[in-house]
Image (tube, rainbow, N blue to C red):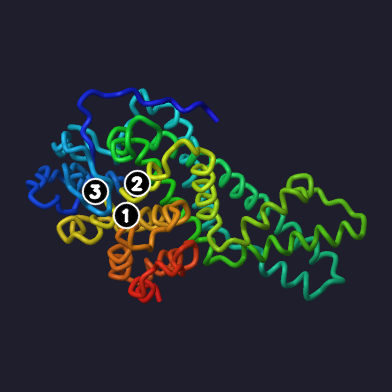
Amino acid sequence: MPAIHRTAPIPDAHPIAAPGISPGKGAAPWPVAPTPPLMVNPLGSALGVSVGLGLPWGSGTGTSPHLPRLPPSRSEPSGFLSPGRCPADAQPTEAETVVWNQVNAVLEESQGVLAELQSYTGAGQEIREAIQNPGDLRLQERAWSAVCPLVAKLKRFYEFSLRLENALRSLLEALTCPPYPPTQHLEREQALAKQFAEILHFTLSFDELKMTNPAIQNDFSYYRRTISRNRINNLQLDAESEVNNEMANRMSLFYAEATPMLKTLSNATTKFVSENKTLPIEDTTDCLSTMACVCRVMLETPEYRSRFTNTETLLFCMRVMVGVIILYDHVHPVGAFAKTSKIDMKGCIKVLKDQPSTSTEGLLNALRYTTRHLNDDTTSKQIRALLQ
């Protein structure tokens, strides 16, 4: 992995905090930046949309339970952007370039991966005919010929998950490294923040497609049974050289997960925290909770929500919110559902349930079944009821 290029200090950089949260008692109201026209990137960026909607990230001395206290001396709201920059089209600064290039190479592949997965139809018919007619060599060969290129495609998906994992780790290091707190990193490294959001959007999109396509596991199971049967009969098949037994075992574990990409990123985030013992865990969790808060406010505030003219942008925002919640829940010692969590889980769940169920049921299921702390004693009955 390329070395992480540390960000040099920028004089007078203002801290940021999540929008839509009242300042502390006695504090002056936060000014809101003028609202420019909505700027929608087809790939979307929850962070970019927040600026297109004029959503300020600047706070002041607020004492929100959802964000760490900011220094009183830095009370000027900076907004998420410096003038003239839009995260939807944010270009990396010189300090961001090394990490940005590495991550961009991965993201450029992501749309192709989604397109391939969306068009994945499987070899169900060929496999059924081969199983029903075990003595028909022609049907056996036909099924094998249909399955092999599909397994090669599944291998590419798995290998892509490994590159995505490395990309996420690079972004986590860049967005949490000293001397700046995560909220300032999100303001300063806007191009990297956008990439972080795009990785989460891809991850939730991939897993939604995978969960609704049983052909993936059926094809791979048939492939492994055929390989095992031929080993017993001392036959060597050409496809084994591409997907050997060790690779097949790793792929089997990957596709056995209901949400394999999300599981990969959750493990990567947990590993990142455990390997960086000198880095306060709050640096990682505050980065995640800030992004979750921004997405929630955009979704639940009519003024901002009414400006979403693109359904995909709305889905993007929801996927990013759910993605960072799940990562937070895996990393934080007490998780996202406890009263002490910096994420407003009731608000996040409610904003999902307010959308059409066809677009959010998969996301709600991700919260139900891929988080770690939902069933803990520290989770309130009200939150559990919301996810029933």
Q: Which residue is mark 2?
A: 286
- Circles 2 and 3 in contact, beta carbons < 8 Å: no
Q: Is residue 147 above or below residue 104?
A: below
Where does the image place residue 22, in percent across and percent down from the top left? Answer: 15, 53
**How many residues crowd around disc 1 within 10 Å: few (fewer than 14), some, or many (20 or more)?**
many
- Circles 1 and 2 in contact, beta carbons < 8 Å: yes
**Upstream in sequence: badge 1 or badge 3:** 3
Give SS at disc 2.
helix
Q: Which residue is mark 1?
A: 342
Question: Foreground: 334 or 182?
Answer: 334
Q: CA distance from mark 1 to mark 2?
A: 8 Å
Q: Of the numbered discs in the image, which one, if any, rests on residue 18? A: 3
Where does the image place residue 85, in percent across and percent down from the top left? Answer: 23, 34
Q: Name the residue: 39% across, 41% down.
A: 195
Q: If the image is split into quadrants, where does the C terminus sit?
A: bottom left
Where does the image place residue 68, in percent across and percent down from the top left? Answer: 28, 46
**How many residues crowd around disc 2 within 10 Å: few (fewer than 14), some, or many (20 or more)?**
many
**Residue 143 visible within the image:** yes
Name the amino acid, label 2. Answer: Asp
Question: Foreground: 293 or 351?
Answer: 293
Name the amino acid, label 3. Answer: Ala
